[in-house]
Image (tube, rainbow, N blue to C red):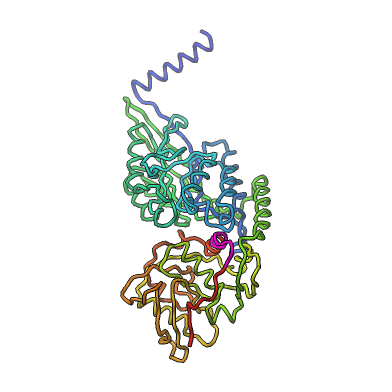
């Protein structure tokens, strides 16, 4: 008998044995998880080590793929925004870097929608990797171009089901316009059950979801492995039946999950057992990939040049000196507060004068640059929107005015508010009147207020903000600097002046 006939006979014999008794398959697969990576370059962290960034992430991914095992790289979303660069290029360079990583499954996070529907669709069209989001639909209720709800791939005879879901509260936390978001937990469960019906032996869900939602998916038992983003935690959970993980943020750490999946088929029925091993890769121990590092370096150089491009020109003097922004209404404070209110559509905005740090005067005719904005707003603060009662807003503003006539970092720079102040009255009772828009403050009414995350945590004595209801979390909030950059671009010519928002007797 020829070698070819002997091989064919052997295959036939195996098929007969599997059909009549039992047959087993074992697949060994490594899942690599990255999520919430906003920054191109690595960062020096408090322990003195450099971690994260795309070059170190690329080194991890290449090393894992080079091991010769089956590797599935999952990206659980949030990368196009927010970062300084994203405020200038709307995520274009980050998308190019992600293409170099080439994840096997990508699920958008809420920050992928920060620049609106058109930019989101454009960036996703530029993606050279598979896109998943079972709970994301267009205005017509249909799946978006290039997006999958689920798929099955066979590895060493084992059928791996993949599904994904984006953050279902994105309409509140970002700017997806008329895109529709189905409930994350229910949709993921439905997709997992569909994969089982379609023959999947092992189901993986990549989700951009809150930790509460992660646990809800976990507890359905419909998904074997949940790979999540959004909370920025380094997190692993395994109870002997199901597992889930999240990989911190900015690729400071990367989670690798080595899974051995055993499938036994007997009398036409398949039974599955599996067991994971978890490896936490500290990217401080990784040598950056030189190819990706070169791209990052080029982009950093381009970014540096773009920081000096003109955003707009001021027609009025902007004074950011300490004695101005910490003691009285300032045109530059009004500009920052207006940008915060415009970007959030809040009723009013309050930012602390101490957060404006440039300490200089921009004469009329000055071309304002992104570097100027970053000089003035160096703390990477984010804009939080809170709901606050009028009475609590009044008390918070009293705190902001309490150090007068001495300059203080807590002095409020405002938008949408008109405040009359008598500095001769005792601290805590200096406000004579307040208007929100054109109407007197109603102490019982709930207002939407934009502020920065430092003040929202109670910083500078704004404890009333700390106790207010947040409408977005700090994880979902945009950078103040990016809002100001976009606002100046939109204005073209800055005519924002000190126009009587805070009048002191």
Q: Position of residue 172 (x, y in %)?
A: 39, 57
Question: Magenta stretch containing residue 266, yes or no?
Answer: no
Instruction: Name the side, left or right, on which 164 lies relative to 81.
Output: left
Closer-to-camera residue (376/279):
376
Q: Image quadrant of residue 431?
A: bottom left
Instruction: Name the side, left or right, on which 395 lies relative to 105.
Output: left
Q: Position of residue 459 (x, y in %)?
A: 48, 75
Q: What residue is drawn where x is 62% and y is 58%?
A: 50
Residue range corresponding to the magenta coloring: 486-494
Q: Position of residue 440 (x, y in %)?
A: 36, 77
Instruction: Name the side, left or right, on which 403 lies relative to 294.
Output: left
Q: What residue is drawn where x is 49% and y is 68%?
A: 338
Above-or-below relation of 293 to 162: below
Q: Image quadrant of residue 46?
A: bottom right
Q: Position of residue 373 (x, y in %)?
A: 60, 66
Q: What residue is drawn where x is 55% and y is 80%?
A: 326
| Number of on-image labels | 0
Closer-to-camera residue (316/6):
316
Which residue is the extreme one toward the top?
1
Secondary structure predominantly adopted by residues drawn in magenta: helix
């Amino acid at each position: 008998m020829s070698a070819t006939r002997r091989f064919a006979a052997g295959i036939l014999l195996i098929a007969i044995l599997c059909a009549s008794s039992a047959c087993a398959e074992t697949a060994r697969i490594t899942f690599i998880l990255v999520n919430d990576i906003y920054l191109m370059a690595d960062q020096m962290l408090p322990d003195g080590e450099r971690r994260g960034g795309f070059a170190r992430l690329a080194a991890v991914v290449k090393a894992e793929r080079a091991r010769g095992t089956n590797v599935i790289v999952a990206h659980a979303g949030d990368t196009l925004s927010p970062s300084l660069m994203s405020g200038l290029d709307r995520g274009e360079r980050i998308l190019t870097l992600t293409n170099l990583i080439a994840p096997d499954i990508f699920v958008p996070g809420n920050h992928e929608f920060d620049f609106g529907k058109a930019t989101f669709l454009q960036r996703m069209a530029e993606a050279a990797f598979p896109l998943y989001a079972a709970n994301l639909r267009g205005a017509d209720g249909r799946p978006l171009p290039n997006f999958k709800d689920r798929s099955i791939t066979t590895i060493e005879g084992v059928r791996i089901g993949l599904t994904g879901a984006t953050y279902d509260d994105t309409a509140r936390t970002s700017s997806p316009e008329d895109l529709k978001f189905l409930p994350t937990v229910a949709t993921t469960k439905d997709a997992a059950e569909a994969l089982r019906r379609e023959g999947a032996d092992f189901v993986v869900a990549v989700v951009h979801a809150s930790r509460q939602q992660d646990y809800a998916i976990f507890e359905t038992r419909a998904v074997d492995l949940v790979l999540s983003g959004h909370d920025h935690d380094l997190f692993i959970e395994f109870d002997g039946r199901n597992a889930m993980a999240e990989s911190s943020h900015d690729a400071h750490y990367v989670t690798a999950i080595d899974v051995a999946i055993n499938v036994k088929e007997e009398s036409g029925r398949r039974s599955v057992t599996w067991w994971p091993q978890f490896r936490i890769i500290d990217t401080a121990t990784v040598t950056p990939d030189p190819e990706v590092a070169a791209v990052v370096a080029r982009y950093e150089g381009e970014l540096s040049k773009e920081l000096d491009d003109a955003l707009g020109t001021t027609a009025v003097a902007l004074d950011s000196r300490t004695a101005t922004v910490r003691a009285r209404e300032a045109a530059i404070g009004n500009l920052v507060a207006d940008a915060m209110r415009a970007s959030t559509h809040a009723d009013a905005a309050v930012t602390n004068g101490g957060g404006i740090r440039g300490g200089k005067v921009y004469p009329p005719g000055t071309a304002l640059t992104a570097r100027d904005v970053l000089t003035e707003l160096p703390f990477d603060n984010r804009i939080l929107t809170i709901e606050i009662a009028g009475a609590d807003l009044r008390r918070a503003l009293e705190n902001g005015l309490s150090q007068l006539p001495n300059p203080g970092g807590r002095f409020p720079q405002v938008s949408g508010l008109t405040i009359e102040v008598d500095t001769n009255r005792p601290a805590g009772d200096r406000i004579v009147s307040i208007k929100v828009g054109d109407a007197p403050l109603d102490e019982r009414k709930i207002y939407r207020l934009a502020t920065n995350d430092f003040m929202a945590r109670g910083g500078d004595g704004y404890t009333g903000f700390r106790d207010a209801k947040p409408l977005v979390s700090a994880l979902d909030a945009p950078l103040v600097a990016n809002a100001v950059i976009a606002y100046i671009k939109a204005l073209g010519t800055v005519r924002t002046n000190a126009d009587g928002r805070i009048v002191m007797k």
